Each structure stands twice: as structure tokens, then as C-alpha cells.
Amino acid sequence: MSETPKKANPQWGGRFTAGPSAVMREINASIGFDQRLWRQDITGSLAHAAMLAKVGVISAEDEQAIRAGLAAIAHEIETGRFPFDAALEDIHMNIEARLTERIGEAGRRLHTARSRNDQVATDFRLWVRDAIDGLTAQITDVMRALADRAAVHAGDPMPGFTHLQTAQPVTLGHHLLAYVEMLDRDRGRLADCRRRLNECPLGSAALAGTSFPIDRTITAQALGFDRPSANSLDAVSDRDFALEFLAAASISAMHLSRFAEEIVIWCSAPWRFIRLSDAFTTGSSIMPQKRNPDAAELVRAKTGRIAGALIALLTVMKGLPLAYAKDMQEDKEPVFDAAEAWALSLAAIAGMVRDMTPDVARMRELAGSGYATATDLADWLVRSPKLPFRDAHHVTGRLVAAAEAKGVDLAGLTLAEMQAVEPRITADVFSVLGVEASVASRTSLGGTAPANVAREAARWREALA
């Protein structure tokens, strides 16, 4: 790599006479990744120019020239004809330099009463806000897919697990609705993040505000912010909104990963709960029988990237004094990468939920395995012979041991064998030992009774319509 300095960046004015080394140019430039902020940068500049004209800092003619020039630049970028220049470092200086080329002196007036510090803070907030809106729509789509499936399978039993060991029967619909609840909390975190970030830094300038008679409320309203930020130091140095976005992303990615893990398990041969089509599986280069749930595995893996982005930005920010420091240039790539990975993961989960074919017979078969109705037996002992629950728990444990020794499920024990353990047991006990009876009995609020699940699925489908 050549170390020959280039001429000074013309945007710096007269302070520098020689240019940076090749290494400095490479480490300092961000145009390779921040060019994706171009829409937000142009939008912010249009609002800023309109405000400057309204308060009389620039003329109406200059504002019109700026507006026309930025429209032409937007068209150049959209059509792939914009001459991005790494020597100009970032998207802000690239657009401003091109604007000056196109419209002359009016372009040089645009940067009045602002700095790249408040400019990038504004652009980045706009980008994250746009990302939140898109991701919220995607989360809602996944919720809708899950709720639709839950309505179909509101009464289909499957094993419920704790410690990945059979615990009690639930329904597939109830299981799917658990993820709807998780995703709704994810939407809530994004809504909170959006509300807190929706303050406009533009007009804070480098760190201390400006002496020009600007009206920051005009630009805030034009850009859809709730208000201008209250402190110029905080406005240019705050990246809490990006951290909060990444925290919300990390929690949501964890939820998606949990469901992806279940898809992987459910697809495996020993379980055979669901089947995914060719659309969301891959084959093996050596084993022709394989159908690998790679989409689910990759969703699971992307959680590491997303959580890693949060840790990366926390580490960047942890030691920075006020106000802006160049370290903060490292804020965008983690956010861009996490948003992209999150969006792709949501799309994959939505696709797999709609694609999967549950084997309801297999799920029902295993729903009663592992003495899954033992709790129903204990509850019956409390209701009928009126045993204290701890005594009922002990009796049930002995009956499970007896069934295990005999090699049958609980319903496979005879009444006499049960009465040998607890004489007060009657033939009515067999009415609670079936899987369907078990799930139907869980009628408490939030329980897995099919009527509950059908009602909740209908409520969610209406809310998400």
C-alpha cells in the first residue's frame, strides 16, 4: 500500500495543505458502508435547507437550487450513476461535494448552521426509525402466521416439555401462541425504542449549537420527529437509540432462535413432529436420504451475529467522553448488519411456519408418553378422595413406578393395582388419564384447553388482521 499523501480534502478548507496517508484514508473513510444512509441524508438536507430559507439565512433561490440539485443526486444514486469518492470519506461529504459541482455556490451554503456531527446523528436516527417500521411489520407477519397455524391446531395434542423431558400434554396451537406472546413483546420493545429515538439532533451543530437564528422545531416537524433534542452535547454524542435497537434485536433473535431450535428437533427422525418442504431444506453431498433444516439452523446461528453487534457497540461507546469522537463511526456497521440478519431471520421463520406440515398423529402418540398425565392423576386424587396435594403427589409417584415396572402407561394399570397403592381410588380415575381429557381440563386463564386456544388464536388473528 502506497504511503504517498494525496492533496488535502477540499471540504476541509484551509487548515490542511497536504493529504492523509493511504492508511489514514482507508481507516478514516466510511463511504463503503454509510452510503446506505443516502436517502436519510438527502431528506435531512432538504429539511435543513427549507428551514434556513424560512428564517432568512439563505435565499429562496438558493433553497430552490439545493432542492433541485438534491433531487438530481437522488436520481443518480438510484440509477447507479453517482460517483462515490472514498477521498471524500462519507456519504455527507460525497453528496455535498456533488451538489456543489451541480449548482455551484448555493451548494456551499447548505452546510450553514450544521455539522457532520448533528447531520450523521440525524441521518442515523432516521435510518433506525425506518428499520424499526419495517421490522415491526415483519414481526407482525410472523405473529400472523403463527396465529393462523394455532387456530388450525387448537385441539391437536403434543407433548409439553420441561428440561426437554415430557411433562404434560399441551396442544400445538397453544405452543405456537407462546411465540406470538414473545414476538408481541419484541414489537413493544421496538415501539419503545422508536418513541425514545424520535428527537431531532439537527441544529445542534458540532456540539454547542449555532449562532444562526435557526428554528429547530421546523426541521424536527419536517422530518417526523416529535421534538428537537434538548441538549446539543447529548444530541451529537448519543447512540442509546442504536444500542436499544440492538438490544431489542438481540432479544427477538433469541426468541427466533428458540423456535428455530424446536423446528430442528421436530424435523429430526426420532421426533417426526413436522416436515418442511424442499423450499426450506437442503440435501447432503454424500447422504441421499438427508433433508436438513438449514434455514432453521441459520436463523439459530444469526443470533450470535446480532447479539455480537450489541456487545460491539457497547464496547465502542463505553469509554467516550462528551461529545463526538471518531470512534462513533463504528456505530453503523453493527446496526446495519444486525438489522439485515434480523430481517432475514424473520422472513425465514415466517416462511417455515407457513411451509411446515405437522404430523398430528405422531404428536398425539407421543403426547401421553413419559407418564405425561401423572399430574392429572395427582389432581384427581386431590379432587375426589380429597388427598392433600403432597400426599397425592407421593401416591402418584408410586403408581408411576408401578407402571414403569410393569412396562405400561398409567392407564395400563388395573384398578386393583392402583388400589393396592391407594385404596380410595375408584374407576373414575381412568377418565382423566387420556391425553384429550388432560388438555381439555386445563381451562384456567392461559391454559392449554382447546377452547382457550381457539379463543386466543381468534383474538390474535383479529388483532393482527
Image (cartoon, rainbow, N blue to C red):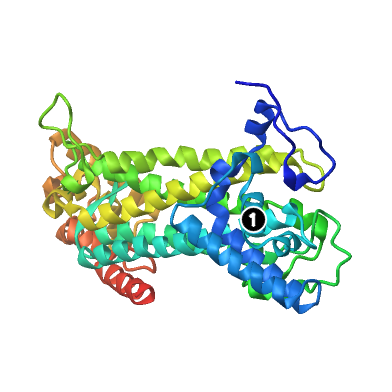
Residue type of the residue flagged with mark 1: Glu
Location of mark 1 (residue): 101
Find residue 342 and report its horizontal and vertical position in percent: 44, 49
Find residue 93 and report its horizontal and vertical position in percent: 66, 50
The front one of 334 and 208 is 208
Residue at figure coordinates x 82%, y 37% from the top left? 16
Q: Quadrant of the C terminus?
A: bottom left
Apparent side of residue 185 relative to residue 193 in the rendered image (left or right): left
Query: Is 270 above or below relative to 137?
Result: above
Find residue 421 and report its horizontal and vertical position in percent: 23, 44
Which corner quadrant of the image does residue 220 belong to? bottom right
- Count of marks placed on residues: 1
Other residues around mark 1 within 10 Å, as few (<14) / some (14–19) / many (≥20): few
Residue at figure coordinates x 32%, y 46% from the top left? 161
Apparent side of residue 363 relative to residue 80 in the rendered image (left or right): left
Query: Quick one: SS at disc 1?
Result: helix
The front one of 145 and 455 is 145
Query: Is 311 above or below relative to 72?
Result: above
Residue at figure coordinates x 10%, y 29% from the top left? 288
